[in-house]
Image (cartoon, rainbow, N blue to C red):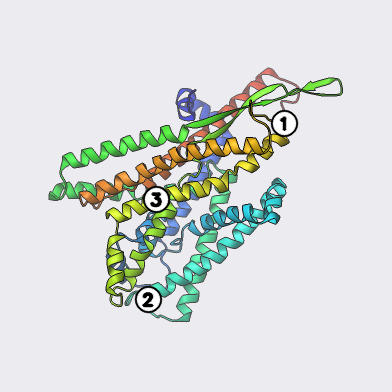
Amino acid sequence: MASAAEQLAANFSFSNLGKSRELRQRIFFTLGALIVARLGTYIPMPGIDPAVLAQQVQQQAGGLLDVFNTLAGGAVERMAIFALSIMPYITASIIIQVMTSVFPELEALKKEGEAGRKVLNQYTRYGTVFIALIQSYGIAIGLENWGNAVIDPGWFFRITAMITLTSGTILLMWIGEQITSRGVGNGISLIIFVGIVAGFPRVIGQSLEQMRTGAASPFLFVMITAIATALVLGIVFMERAQRRLFVTYPKRQVGNKIYGGESSHLPIKLNVSGVIPPIFASSLLLLPTTYASFNAQNMPEWLSTIVQALSRGQPIYMLLYGALIFFFAFFYTSVVMPPQETAENLKKYGGVLPGIRPGKKSAEFIDYVLTRVTVVGASYLTVVCLLPEFFFYEYNLSFAVGGTSILIVVSVTMDTVAQIQSHLVAQQYEGLLKKSKLRGARR
């Protein structure tokens, strides 16, 4: 079965794109919205001394700020109005998903369809504002402790920072939702994608500079490029991989008509959790390093030893990173695709797994399959994330592009290509309807 990218390459032509006015408008709208999102990463927050801030950020390299700065497209090192990026929205979405499986009231809203989904989305927006206010207050306090980074410390600066950063997150959230509804692709994912891709020219420049100065050999650069290419191919293969459970629908008679008697499949992706486990694992592990960088002078010796052991590239960091990826992969998969709920949905619509009773037995079988699939998916995520870490810190390379960044770029590209292909196919069907002059084609 050909992938969406292969189908797009086979059927794509500029004439088809020119004929599809709606797709062309969606693409232009998406590009315009992403340009606005990028411009916001260059508008500085008021009350900051840029020179002192740049010096302090450079000293904090390798900590949690590096992760957030990569996902925010460089907005953190410039302390722009989009410094929080879209991370509060992602955190609020995950919290709402977890609470949906815990609280029956939220679970009932989830089952109400479109109306319930709108209410949950509104709760997610409220949670985004709350989380953004807390994070922006923490950033304001941290900036005040960074020497002379803040021109006039105090409550006026803190309130200004909270309003500015929270407003930037809300604007990014709105831009992402507009891209999803009026553009092409998932808006939130595309904003993160553009931020990561915007840093690639700097990475290439750093690598060329290291080769020019002799800090890195050309052979090592070629080897890293080959590894990155292999990672991209592996990610494409694994993200397309599915475990399909055969499902049959028995025949049933309603009046004089017979319905059902069809067969289908329940697709289970090899990587159900996506990029959430690496992001959460790296954020949790880098918290001690970030705290130590803010309080280096008052830190006790035993805490300094722990922080050193948890630094990036250290063996304990690697082991804990892999273990946390496994944990979050299983945890988030159980939230996104609970076996009991999946089995109930199959039973509700008359679907039967061959040879397995509906209800509890089906849930146990789905859980059995999902557990083994998640082991493979978590192992794949661990290899993708740890392999670049090993090479970059083993050879002391400063132009590192993490496995999480490559994973996000490839996954978002595949999803966007699939949506473009679906729009082109829909446009071709509309053209067939118009040519055949079928009744109702104008409608």
Q: CA distance from mark 3 to mark 1?
A: 39 Å
- Badge 1: residue crowd in 10 Å (few <14, some 14–19, many ≥20): some
Residue at image position (27%, 73%) is: 301
Q: Quadrant of the C terminus?
A: top right
- List x then y, in percent, for residue 436: 68, 18
Q: Secondary structure at mark 2?
A: loop
Residue at x-position 41% and y-position 80%: 153
* 1 or 2: mark nearer the eye: 1
- Judge whether residue 24 can be spotted in this image: no
* Vertical placement of residue 339 versus 258, above or below: below
Label placed on residue 350: 1
Circles 3, 2 touching at the beta carbon (< 8 Å): no
**Image x and y of residue 254, in percent:** 83, 25
Give the residue furthest to the right: 255
Residue position marked by numbered label 2 in the rendering: 150
Check disc 2 and give the amino acid type.
Val
Q: Residue at x 69, y 54 (%)?
A: 104
Q: Nearer the viewer, mark 3 or mark 2?
A: 3
**Disc 3 or 1, which lies upstream in sequence?**
3
How many numbered callouts?
A: 3
Whether 309 is drawn above or below 270: the answer is: below
Which of the numbered marks, if any, corresponds to residue 323? Answer: 3
Q: Are marks 1 and 2 in contact (CB under 8 Å)?
A: no
Which mark is first along the chain, 2 or 3? 2
Q: Is residue 335 above or below residue 225?
A: below
Q: Work out how far the residue at label 1 is from the one at label 2, CA to CA, in angstroms.
A: 63 Å
* Image position of 347 (left or right of 330): right
Q: Position of residue 2 (x, y in %)?
A: 48, 24
Quadrant housing residue 92: bottom right
